[in-house]
Image (spheres, rainbow, N blue to C red):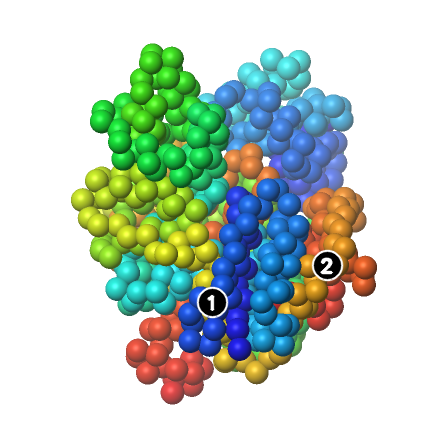
Amino acid sequence: MKLTFPRIGDSHIYGRLLFRELGVDIIIPAPNSEEGLLRGAAKSPEDICLPFKMMTDNLLSAWEKGADTVVMPATMGPCRLGEYGELLAVVMQKYGCNYRWILLDSLSAIGPKELLRRLSMVVEDSPRSTAGILLALAKTYSLIKSHEKLQADARMQSPYEKEKGTVKSILSVCRKELEKADSLSDAMEAVRRNRHRLLTLERSTKRRPLKLLITGEIYTQIDSFGNHHIEDTLMDLGVSFEKGMSIGWWIRNTVLNPFGGLLAEIKKNPLMPHRIGGYAKETVNDAIRYAKEDFDGIIQLFPVGCMPEIVAKSVLDDLTKEERLPALSIIYDEMGGEAGYATRIEAFVEMLERKRETKDVLSGNRCGVCKH
Amino acid sequence: MYYLGIDVGSVSTDFVVMDDSSIIVDQRYLKTGGAPVDAVKEGLRQLAGRFRDSEIRGVGTTGSGRALASAITTHAVAAAALDPEIRTVLEIGGQDSKIILLRDGIVSDFAMNTVCAAGTGSFLDRQAERLGLSVKDLGELYLIAENPVSIAGRCAVFAESDIIHKQQLGCRVEDIIAGMSKALVRNYLSNVAKGKTLLPKICFQGGVAANEGIRRAFEETLGMPVFVPAHHKVMGAFGAAILAKEKMESEAEGSGFRGFSTADEKIESRSINCSDCDNHCQVTVLYSEKGQLGCFSDRCGKYQLRNQKLN
């Protein structure tokens, strides 16, 4: 069995290390690229969203490299009425990629017995004992957690760097080391090393950067090709930001806590009382959280045609008016041009900065550091 | 002393020379024609005769050539400088259309067209060309239309096929133009300005503001007067010049202006496909005879000149 899985953000890094530890053969799809997107778009159903087009290309490229089994979290829920994985399987079949499919739907959707059966298919080739497998899973999860912690810290720290681009380069060095790491332990060590570099970085404390919240659809939030490297753009602009979703968040919300969806459903939210599919409710929850904390603005990302996020967007439009919450929605599809995205993000940041300057002058808070 | 503002857009490249009291003393509106570098050189050449290098205290750039501020900020600053009473700016350019809401002279909210360029200048340009008219004619024809036909404005492709269909049916050209203008305005208001509160005074700027028909269609739809400033085509460049002035006054930095002679330098661009990492950036580097001038699109920044000053 040669296993493969779609790329999303750093999933290829974590997947490679995990399956290496388990002794399962895997094929990593070619990196997301413009050409790949064009091919994926040509083979996907018309009007489908960007993540689907990317995944189509991922799986085509893995098939060419010799993969024969796909493992993919499907969660039987949020997207395309839960038929996302099935639709992808049909498309692959159509182009002669006769994959064997292991769709990891959520516990609440397929029950514990079926889920265990599917999970055991993933590791059927592994020479490891059950305990060894569980240990590898635990180690992978803790790697994901610490890598994401590093990134979260970097997002908050980057505006304070003395030399521009240092924080960005720490992240890219770390990513490269993880791609080359031989084992989960090596990878953990690499993250620790880079975290140390980040924490000991010389900082200029005089700056007072804007603080933004990134929210929206999960794929475009996580995958840097999907969101045209928005994190780099924001770091270049010198703002600090938090991001709602990550692979680790998904694991916590779906795997470790099978009732994550249920919790989101019952969470009180006057603007969106019910989950309407996707992560629309999470987006609105994030926005409401913003209103309570000291964020300066919110950026919502989603691919063209993402129904749940379109609904969330119109809720955000209302929030903008009522709560004076500045929100920018960025919609991604096949357009490769960077200028359009850069213009919108820069304009948004400039607007927030100018707004704050005026507010400071009006409230007599001129200097920004010492409140004089 | 003067300040120069340059706005490189998809359709036009605009120049504004402004004096110390923020009065526009000269302006140029040139077609970009897909060759932004040549357009900038041409503009500098035209201005070189009227101003000396030493008279230019600062230069601000915006649009695709920005090194100072984005199009939203420059348009907002220009409108606020023109008339502090302005609370809504409608801007329709070649490929972007935007709405800016100003409160007390600063941007309080803005929106731009998202994924589609329907209802922007290039659509109008194309239709005018297809009908064998100039953009100016479009405005005049709107005014004499008696019975505007309905055109689907949601999508430029569908709008075009609608227009062709109505032509084949024998509808009068002015009625088609009026229908198209109304469709564009409707699309703008329901798409770009969706959910925004438009308060007077409303200022309409950008290249499309030259089209009297569109302005009239806005007034009819909004039920409010919409005014077009005299320098509506070069508002972005005007804003860039104002910001350059602000910046030069607050920071004691010298200008990085290369001088009007840049117009006569030979400037070449070269594209490199960098394959040093997974990003595979397509890097564009600009050269003059004296060496590298600048470069774009490298994510990691290693092709950038050290200590380079772009503005």
Residue drawn at x 39%, y 82% is A366
Secondary structure under tag 1 reads strand
- Same-chain status of marks 2 and 1: yes
Residue drawn at x 64%, y 15% is A95
- Which image quadrant for residue B303? bottom right
Disc sitting over residue A44 in the figure: none
The amino acid beneath tag 1 is Val
Residue B278 is at least partly visible in this image: no
Give how far across and how far down residue B247 sits, in percent.
51, 74
Secondary structure under tag 2 reads helix
Task: Report in which chain the residue with disc 2 lies.
Answer: B
- Which image quadrant for residue B222? top left
The amino acid beneath tag 2 is Asp
The residue pinned by badge 2 equals B264
Name the foreground residue: A109 vs B116.
B116
Disc sitting over residue B25 in the figure: 1
